[in-house]
């Protein structure tokens, strides 16, 4: 502590911070016009939580229809609308805003900055989102039905949509603008506002992974916007970008879409890598093994994400050389990802482990994300992919990456930093129940989908052959129980916001990094004076990291 | 944030925004060229 002098310590020494807070007065004034990174982070996280349950409701309807063969409740068009909305809401409404919320809360505190670099743009980035999702969710109810072409929006199917198409495309532009502004803010904050002494190779891993994610966002969100703009002009203005009858090429859409879509997958997982890289060292009470290698591995994954896109398109009729290139480049990703998995494992090795809720979620992430990664390697093999393409095996694969991967990472991150945000400890027992129910049922939900896919069950269908019944029933039961167990999450958070045992500044015994030097709850304005940290390493004072 | 830092932040943000716009326009231009080429 000797080398850290800052406003936060002053708060802590005075045993309080309320007198320094200067929060805006009045509910609407505070939340509508806020430029405070913590307020905006909170709004992003609340928005994400709401969308998680909206998107989850669509998933419940999907599993309800698939509980047994035959048409039960919904016609095929509506079912396809559910799958489309589930994906779009979960990706753009739940996961991405959750990461931006965590970035808003944690990056300024972790780099020793008083706020994000562009606070008014930060407010604007957030407040675009509710309007975007009003449009997107509203598109379900317009004449002609909602979007039913899947989140990939392939033409020519997509351009056959009714009024839902322009609404969704406008929503994508808004979401894209929001994401790009958020990413610019993250980059500018990290590049310009780090505390003196915090060189790039001393930044916490969460900050590093978000920096790389932000560059990916800026590189690919405009590509999605371009692709959907062309869909719009094909539909309304008589162009033929993707219309074969007019000399266009529908496969070109797939190339452009996946040039966005594959880096997007990494946008959804890299910040989780950062969160897990914060949690594991804390509860192993060791420094992160191979910090530099972790950064280079993350950057390599970011780079490789741009040269693998056509592995989503092996069956469209690519030249053999292209198939080989995309197969091998995809397999290359296993190397940096393996570096990360082994480094996390090495951090655990001979650590003084304890199993508080954040650690449980991080460990579950480690095991189950690896399952998703390995099935991804199977899908990377072009000849094998011809068999797996468009089956439930693919659904099982990406859900293992996104649910026990991204979602578990986000939940782990919330449980990790929640006492810092609220100043209270949460109900550990209930949080462990949340963990165990989620971990058991997420496997009941998704593991059987591997079997269904290998047996040949296609994805995006409301009905199926009777031989798939048993595993579909198991999967649906897992889905309902997983969905129900998530209700614990907002309950635990709400209880923690309202009160509970007081959290210390450091919260977790092994926690390191600048955010833990602040009192809990973190003052409304933190690091008003930059911390002086000549001896800082990886966001934490050297004498602590070497402990 | 001192004025120098603020100027630097705005400059970085502007460059990044221009990169995003260029990518948007670039991909559409690429598709137009593909189309006219056929």
Image: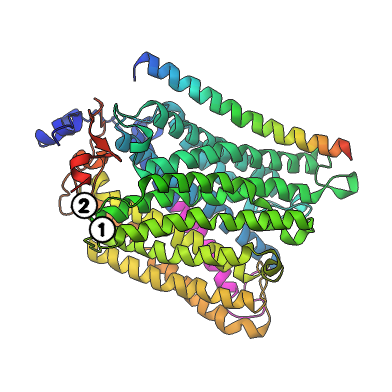
Q: Magenta: predominant secondary structure element?
A: helix
Asked if residue B10 is positioned above or below residue A194 in the image, the reply reads: above
- Pick the residue in front: A74 or A165: A165
Marks 2 and 1 belong to one chain:
yes
Subunit bearing disc 1: A
Q: Name the residue under label 1.
A: A284
Q: Is mark 2 on a helix, strand or loop?
A: loop
Asked if residue A66 is among those painted magenta in the image, a careful observer would answer yes
Residue A205 occupies quadrant? top left
Q: Name the residue under label 2.
A: A510
* In this picture, residue A204 sits left or right of residue A65: left
- The structure residue drawn at horizontal position 34% and vertical position 70%, both measured from the top left corner, is A436
What are the residue bounds of the magenta stretch? A50-75
Q: Are discs 2 and 1 less than 8 Å apart at CB?
A: yes
Asked if residue A241 is positioned above or below residue A450 in the image, the reply reads: above
| Residue A255, image x, y percentages | 72, 48
- The structure residue drawn at horizontal position 41% and vertical position 68%, both measured from the top left corner, is A484
- Pick the residue in front: A445 or A112: A112
* In this picture, residue A537 sits left or right of residue A157: left
Q: What element carries label 1?
A: helix
- Pick the residue in front: A357 or A359: A359
Label 2 and label 1: CA atoms lie apart by: 8 Å
């Amino acid at each position: 502590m000797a080398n850290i002098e800052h406003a936060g310590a002053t708060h802590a020494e005075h045993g309080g911070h309320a007198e320094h807070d200067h929060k805006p007065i009045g509910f609407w004034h505070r939340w509508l016009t806020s430029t405070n990174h913590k307020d905006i982070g909170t709004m992003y996280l609340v928005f994400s939580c709401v969308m998680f349950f909206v998107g989850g409701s669509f998933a419940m309807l999907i599993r309800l229809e698939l509980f047994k063969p035959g048409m039960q409740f919904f016609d095929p068009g509506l079912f396809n609308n559910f799958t489309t909305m589930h994906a779009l809401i979960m990706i753009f409404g739940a996961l991405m805003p959750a990461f931006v919320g965590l970035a808003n809360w944690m990056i300024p505190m972790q780099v020793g900055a008083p706020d994000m670099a562009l606070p008014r743009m930060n407010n604007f980035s957030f407040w675009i989102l509710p309007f975007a999702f009003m449009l997107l969710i509203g598109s379900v109810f317009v004449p002609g039905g909602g979007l039913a072409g899947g989140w990939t929006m392939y033409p020519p199917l997509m351009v056959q949509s009714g009024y839902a198409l322009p609404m969704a495309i406008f929503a994508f532009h808004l979401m894209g603008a929001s994401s790009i502004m958020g990413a610019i803010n993250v980059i500018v904050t990290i590049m310009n506002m780090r505390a003196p002494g915090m060189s790039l190779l001393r930044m916490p891993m969460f900050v590093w992974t978000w920096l790389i994610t932000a560059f990916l966002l800026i590189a690919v969100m405009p590509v999605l916007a371009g692709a959907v703009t062309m869909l719009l002009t094909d539909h309304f203005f008589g162009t033929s970008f993707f219309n074969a009858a007019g000399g266009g090429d529908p496969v070109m859409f797939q190339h452009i879409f996946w040039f966005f879509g594959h880096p997007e997958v990494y946008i959804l997982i890299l910040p989780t890598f950062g969160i897990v890289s914060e949690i594991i060292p804390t509860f192993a009470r060791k420094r992160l093994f191979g910090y530099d290698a972790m950064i280079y591995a993350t950057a390599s994954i970011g780079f490789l994400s741009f040269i693998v896109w056509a592995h989503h398109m092996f069956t469209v009729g690519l030249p053999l050389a292209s198939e080989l290139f995309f197969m091998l480049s995809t397999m290359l990703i296993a190397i940096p990802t393996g570096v990360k998995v082994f480094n996390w494992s090495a951090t655990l090795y001979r650590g003084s482990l304890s199993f508080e809720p954040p650690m449980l979620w991080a460990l579950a992430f480690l095991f189950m994300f690896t399952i998703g990664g390995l099935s991804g390697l199977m899908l990377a093999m072009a000849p094998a992919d011809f068999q797996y393409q468009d089956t439930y095996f693919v659904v099982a694969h990406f859900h293992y990456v996104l649910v026990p991967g991204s979602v578990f990472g986000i939940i782990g991150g919330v449980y990790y930093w929640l006492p810092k945000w609220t100043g209270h400890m949460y109900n550990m027992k209930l949080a462990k129940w949340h963990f165990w129910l989620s971990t058991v049922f997420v496997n009941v939900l998704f593991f059987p989908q591997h079997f269904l896919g290998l047996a040949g069950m296609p994805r995006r269908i409301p009905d199926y052959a009777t031989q798939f019944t048993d595993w579909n029933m198991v999967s649906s039961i897992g889905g309902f129980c997983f969905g129900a167990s998530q209700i614990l999450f907002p309950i635990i958070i709400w209880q923690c916001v309202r009160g509970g045992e007081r959290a210390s500044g450091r919260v977790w015994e092994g926690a390191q990094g600048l955010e833990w030097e602040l009192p809990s709850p973190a003052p409304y304005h933190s690091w008003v004076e930059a911390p002086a940290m000549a001896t800082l390493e990886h966001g934490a004072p050297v004498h602590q990291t070497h402990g | 944030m001192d004025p120098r830092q603020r100027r630097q932040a705005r400059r970085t943000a502007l460059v990044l925004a221009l990169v995003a716009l260029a990518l948007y326009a670039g991909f559409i231009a690429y598709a137009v060229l593909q189309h006219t080429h056929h």
